[in-house]
Image (spheres, rainbow, N blue to C red):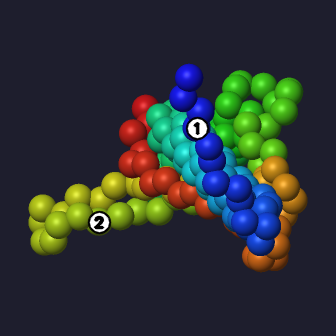
């Protein structure tokens, strides 16, 4: 039978692998959780943008929300309240949790303004509705993506413009 002999490990190298792991492991864990938090931030930004788009589309198609002079119409307050509910809760009623942890109706703004395209007698004026919303990013490990860097809270913003179609 063949016996294989291994060289004895030098006494100065015992435990070197554990020390290397102890040095590298915290960096790998921080990198892993950083990627997870970045993915969550992108997901929350995408969710906020989609919600603002839904609210803007609702207002752009709401009858009586905007007058022919691109001013707020008689139905503007009721339609604006319904659009806020759509943005915050993604439903027709304001029950249940908001779609994002830090999102509330006070952080949503609406505006309507005329926009001219072209020049001369062929100029076309359209009413454009702008919806903007902001929400604080809800990180898993506190206010910052990387707590050791103390970057502070991150603000997510979304803005959408829609041409008023109305009646």
Question: Residue lying furthest left in this view?
Answer: 121
Left-right relation of 60 to 11: left
Q: Position of residue 89 (x, y in %)?
A: 74, 34
Q: Which image quadrant for residue 142? A: bottom right
Question: Which corner quadrant holds the N terminus?
Answer: top right
Tell me which residue sits at (58%, 38%) in the image.
4
Mark 1 neighbour class, 10 Å CA radius: few under 14, some 14 to 19, many 20 or more: few
Question: Foreground residue, 40 or 165?
Answer: 40
Left-right relation of 7 to 122: right
Say which mark, if any, is on residue 116.
2
Q: Which residue is mark 1?
A: 4
Q: Position of residue 124 (x, y in %)?
A: 23, 58
- CB under 8 Å between discs 1 and 2: no
Tell me which residue sits at (78%, 25%) in the image.
93
Left-right relation of 36 to 166: right
Residue 71 visible here: no
- Where 68 falls versus 154 (above or below)? above
Residue 128 visible here: yes
Q: Secondary structure at mark 1?
A: loop
Q: Which image quadrant for residue 51? A: top right
Tell me which residue sits at (54%, 29%) in the image.
2
Q: Label 1, label 2: how many angstroms apart (C-alpha)?
A: 87 Å
Q: Which image quadrant for residue 21? A: bottom right
């Amino acid at each position: 039978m063949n016996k294989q002999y291994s060289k004895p490990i030098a006494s100065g190298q015992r435990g070197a692998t554990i020390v290397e792991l102890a040095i590298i492991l915290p960096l790998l864990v921080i990198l892993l959780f950083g990627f997870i938090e970045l993915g969550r931030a992108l997901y929350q930004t995408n969710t906020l943008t989609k919600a603002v788009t839904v609210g803007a589309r609702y207002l752009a198609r709401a009858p009586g929300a905007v007058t022919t002079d691109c001013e707020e119409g008689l139905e503007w307050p009721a339609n604006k309240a319904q659009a806020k509910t759509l943005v915050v809760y993604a439903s027709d009623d304001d029950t249940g949790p908001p779609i994002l942890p830090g999102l509330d109706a006070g952080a949503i703004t609406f505006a309507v303004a005329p926009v001219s395209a072209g020049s001369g007698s062929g100029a076309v004026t359209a009413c454009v509705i702008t919806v903007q919303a902001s929400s604080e990013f809800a990180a898993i490990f506190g206010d910052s993506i990387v707590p050791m860097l103390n970057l502070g809270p991150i603000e997510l913003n979304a803005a959408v413009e829609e041409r008023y179609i109305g009646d």
